[in-house]
Each structure stands twice: as structure tokens, then as C-alpha cells.
């Protein structure tokens, strides 16, 4: 999608569709919605007054303009209460705008955003871009035919009318594009099924990302893992024909001595559960068990595109978790890279095993911080539903920073405790620790397990 800053009077520029957000306030429209209302003959005020349009979040009123100059149509989109207006409101409005354009089979639209909403023009431009580019994403690469009704419905151009420093706006667009493209890459990789998105495939994608973004790429295969003593990652991989990979991407935008931020992501390309097999209902969803790894690859692509002045390393341990005569069994004891021994109680708790070796390997970069993202436990969804990700950490300040970042990105994180009592649930009678700690606090004991491998 091409996104650009437009100048001039939005009501005097010919465009198929103009988006005008309307905050939910008492009385007739104010500010720029009022100007747009005059253009559509006062029908916005009429709709508000007659309560056929309440300006609730994402509620839409589509009206046709009069005359030959100016927009052909205006979509007024509810922005909700002004005091609740934030970056996520703008993303949602632009997401809705893209859906409206698709429904009208329009490929160009513009949006008129108010400078007085308490958001900087940088944030407004960034979040508008993100909302549109994320909404326009489709996973169609495996369909051989387009849906006939979808023809001509791909939004290609977005213009923004936004008062403010043009340099700030264009920076916002640049950052928004990089972040949304990174997210869309993650979504594409997530949606590729297990027979296509194998560990080898993720490694190839990492090489492509590295080449395009000027990142250093290192890929470890089984031989290198053996040399590294990665017995946990290899134990998970021993039950499948697909070779595991450890993917390392390095962005060196900071000083040569600056310790890097290391992002680690679980790249389990299909999780059948191993010998502790999962029920078959919904098992196809287990192609998504590499989502943490996909997020890290997308993040590194965005970091490279923005050329952040930081050192950032992405590490993705990748394997399948299947069943075979060679698969790891409940009761097996394995030796991790860190040297600690683990009694495998449940082979479906494999994410923490591959991550244990990846986190141990992350130490070799002498990191400033490590952030590990994973679809690690169903228990986390039981605790927080789909409204937030659980965040567990050894550094309260870093946990707070992640929460803040999540709020800005519209991706909430919520902290869970990591008290030492939980570690006792992992005590093993034959090894240093077990890979599961029973049903109570399943998310926390998973984090307690990982903590053993970060020094
Ligand atoms: Mg599992
Ligand atoms: Zn898993």
C-alpha cells in the first residue's frame, strides 16, 4: 500500500472515498466533521440528532457528496468518547475504512484526521498507516482463484490529511509501514501450514529477511546443535523427519560494544504433542505454534527497515513435535545446553525445551535484556483469555516497559508473579527439574522453568 501525506482542502480534492472520524459528543458535530457535514448537506447532523448514528466506536455512516469536485463519498466513522480516544482508535477507524473501501470496490481512499485529539501528528500518522496496512492484509497465496466478488477490492493508496510538521508525519508513515509490514510478515508465516512452513522454510525466510535488510544471518542445523550440546532442542526434534534449525538474525545499529536486546521466539512449526499426543479436534491450529518465532522474524524485518540505532538479535529455535519410534518419551531424562538435566514428564511441554537451549545460547551475546515470545501454555489463555498476553519476568522495570509498549501497540501484556514457591512444583526425583509442574499455575511454572536457563 502506498501511504502519503496530502495537503489542501479535503473537501475540494476529488477522491472516491474520504474517511472522517466523528467523536461521540453531545449536540451537533464540531470541528472538521461539521465542515464535512456541510458538504453532505447536513445529513451527519440529522443522523446524529435522530439517533440513527451515535458515533459509537467503528459505527459507520456512508454518504454521497454533491458536486463534481471534492470526494465522491464520505464515510463518517464513530470514534467513540473523546476521553477514550487513543492510538488504537485510529487503527480501528482505518481498519474499518479499508473494509468499507473493499466493500465498495474502491482502491484509493483518504482520511481526514484531527490534529486536536491529543495525539502527536507522528502517532496519528503511524497508527493510521498501521490500521490500514494491517486491515488490507490477506492470506491468499494458497488459493488458486480469487473470489469473484473480491475483484478490484484491494486498497492500494491511502492519503492522509493531517495538520502538523510534515517531517513528523512522514516519519510516522515510515514507522507505521515498517511495523505493519513486519506484523503482516508474521501473520503470513503463521498461516502457512506445517507442510510448507517447516523449520527449513523459516530458516530460508530468515535468510531472505537478512539479505533484504542487511542483517547478519546464522543458521544452526543438527550437527552444530550437537556441538553446542543442545540436548533439549534435539530431543524434541528426534521424533520427526524434519530437521530442526536454530535461526539467528543480528541487526548491528548500535555501537560495537553496546550489549544487544535479544528477542527469542518459539518456532514450533507443528505441535502434535509428541507421545503425549493432543486431541485431534482443532489440532490443525497447531501450525500456529511457531507464532512467537514468526513475531521475532517480523520484528527483525521491521527493525532493519527502520534501521534502529540499536543492536538487536533475534533467535528462533525451530522444530516439529511429532510421534515416531524415535520420539522422546515421558520419563526420559535429557541434558540441556546449560548442563541441567530435565525429566520429560509431558512431551507436549516441548516449547520450553527448545526455548531452554535458545535462551542458554542467547547468553553468548551478553545481552542487555532478553524478551522471549511463545505460544507456551494453554493455561495462559485460561487465565487471561484473548484480551492480553501474560508477561513474566525477572526484571520488574523490563516488565513495565513491555506493558507500556503493549499499550501503545494495542497489544496488552499483563504481569503474572514468578515467586520462588512455584519452582518447587518442578522438583524431580531423578533429574534437576521436570518439564511440567502439574495443573496449578501452568503458565507460571512454564516461566519458572525457562528462568533456570537465563543465568
Ligand atoms: Mg506442546
Ligand atoms: Zn507447543
Image (cartoon, rainbow, N blue to C red):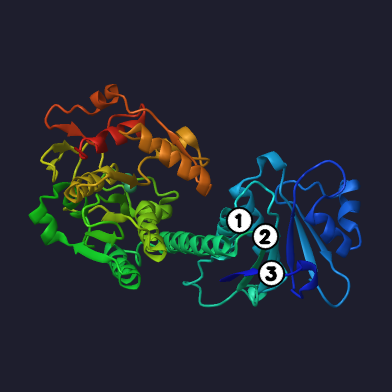
Q: Which mark is residue 277?
A: none
Q: Residue at x 35, y 72 (%)?
A: 212
Who's the residue at 42% across and 63% down the image? 306
**Which is nearer the eye, 278 or 292?**
292
According to the picture, the residue beneath numbered tag 3 turns out to be: 7
User: In percent of the image, x 29 and y 25: which residue is there?
Assistant: 422
Q: Secondary structure at mark 2?
A: loop
Give the residue pinned by disc 1: 121
Between the residue at mark 2 and the residue at mark 1, the CA separation in whole angstroms equals 7 Å
Give the image quarter of residue 368.
Answer: top left
In which quarter of the view is residue 102 placed? bottom right
Classify residue 204 as left or right of residue 104.
left
Do residues under tags 2 and 1 come within 8 Å of each other at their CB atoms? yes
Q: Residues within 10 Å of mark 1 (few under 14, many from 20)?
A: many
Q: SS for tag 1? A: helix
- Residue 329 sits above or below residue 140 on the image: above
Q: Position of residue 204 (x, y in %)?
A: 29, 69
How dense is the environment of label 3, judged by Cα within 10 Å: few (below 14), some, or many (20 and up)? Answer: few
The answer, for residue 319, to whether it is visible in the render is: no
Assign a secondary structure to mark 3.
loop
**In which quadrant is the C terminus drawn?**
top left
Residue highlighted by disc 2: 163
Q: Position of residue 360 (x, y in %)?
A: 19, 45
Q: Position of residue 209 (x, y in %)?
A: 34, 68
Q: Is residue 233 left or right of residue 4?
A: left
Amino acid at each position: 500500500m502506498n501511504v502519503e501525506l496530502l495537503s489542501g482542502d479535503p473537501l475540494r480534492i476529488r477522491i472516491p472515498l474520504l474517511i472522517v472520524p466523528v467523536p461521540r459528543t453531545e449536540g451537533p458535530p464540531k470541528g472538521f466533521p461539521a465542515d464535512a457535514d456541510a458538504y453532505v448537506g447536513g445529513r451527519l447532523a440529522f443522523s446524529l440528532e435522530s439517533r440513527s448514528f451515535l458515533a459509537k466506536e467503528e459505527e459507520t455512516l456512508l454518504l454521497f457528496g454533491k458536486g463534481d469536485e471534492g470526494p465522491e463519498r464520505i464515510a463518517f466513522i464513530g470514534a467513540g468518547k473523546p476521553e477514550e480516544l487513543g492510538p488504537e482508535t485510529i487503527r480501528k477507524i482505518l481498519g474499518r475504512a479499508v473494509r468499507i473501501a473493499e466493500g465498495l470496490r474502491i482502491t484509493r481512499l483518504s482520511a481526514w484526521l484531527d490534529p486536536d485529539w491529543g495525539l502527536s501528528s507522528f502517532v496519528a500518522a503511524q497508527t493510521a498507516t498501521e490500521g490500514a496496512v494491517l486491515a488490507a492484509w490477506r492470506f491468499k497465496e494458497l488459493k488458486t482463484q480469487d473470489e469473484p466478488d473480491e475483484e478490484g477490492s484491494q486498497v492500494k493508496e491511502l492519503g492522509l490529511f493531517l495538520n502538523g510538521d510534515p517531517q513528523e508525519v512522514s516519519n510516522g508513515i515510515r514507522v507505521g509501514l515498517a511495523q505493519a509490514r513486519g506484523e503482516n510478515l508474521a501473520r503470513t508465516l503463521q498461516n502457512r501450514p506445517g507442510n510448507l512452513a517447516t523449520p527449513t522454510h523459516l530458516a530460508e525466510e530468515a535468510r531472505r529477511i537478512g539479505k533484504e535488510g542487511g542483517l547478519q544471518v546464522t543458521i544452526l542445523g543438527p550437527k552444530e546443535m550437537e556441538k553446542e550440546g543442545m540436548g533439549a532442542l534435539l530431543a524434541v526434534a528426534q521424533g520427526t523427519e524434519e530437521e530442526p534449525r536454530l535461526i539467528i538474525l543480528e541487526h548491528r545499529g548500535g555501537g560495537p560494544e553496546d550489549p544487544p536486546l535479544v528477542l527469542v521466539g518459539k518456532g514450533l512449526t507443528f505441535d502434535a504433542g509428541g507421545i503425549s499426543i493432543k486431541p485431534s479436534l482443532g489440532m490443525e491450529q497447531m501450525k500456529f505454534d511457531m507464532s512467537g518465532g514468526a513475531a521475532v522474524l517480523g520484528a527483525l524485518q521491521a527493525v532493519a527497515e527502520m534501521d534502529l540505532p540499536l543492536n538487536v538479535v533475534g533467535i528462533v529455535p525451530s522444530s516439529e513435535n511429532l510421534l515416531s519410534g524415535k520420539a522422546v518419551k515421558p520419563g526420559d531424562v535429557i541434558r540441556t545446553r546449560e548442563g541441567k538435566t530435565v525429566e520429560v514428564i509431558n512431551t507436549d511441554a516441548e516449547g520450553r525445551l527448545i526455548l531452554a537451549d535458545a535462551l542458554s545460547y542467547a547468553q553468548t551475546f551478553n545481552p542487555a535484556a532478553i524478551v522471549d515470545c511463545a505460544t507456551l501454555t494453554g493455561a495462559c489463555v485460561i487465565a487471561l483469555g484473548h484480551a492480553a498476553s501474560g508477561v513474566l519476568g525477572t526484571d520488574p522495570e523490563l516488565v513495565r516497559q513491555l506493558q507500556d509498549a503493549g499499550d501503545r501497540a494495542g497489544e496488552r501484556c499483563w504481569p503474572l508473579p514468578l515467586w520462588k514457591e512455584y519452582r518447587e512444583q518442578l522438583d524431580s526425583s531423578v533429574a534437576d527439574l521436570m518439564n511440567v509442574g502439574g495443573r496449578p499455575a501452568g503458565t507460571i511454572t512454564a516461566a519458572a522453568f525457562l528462568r533456570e536457563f537465563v543465568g
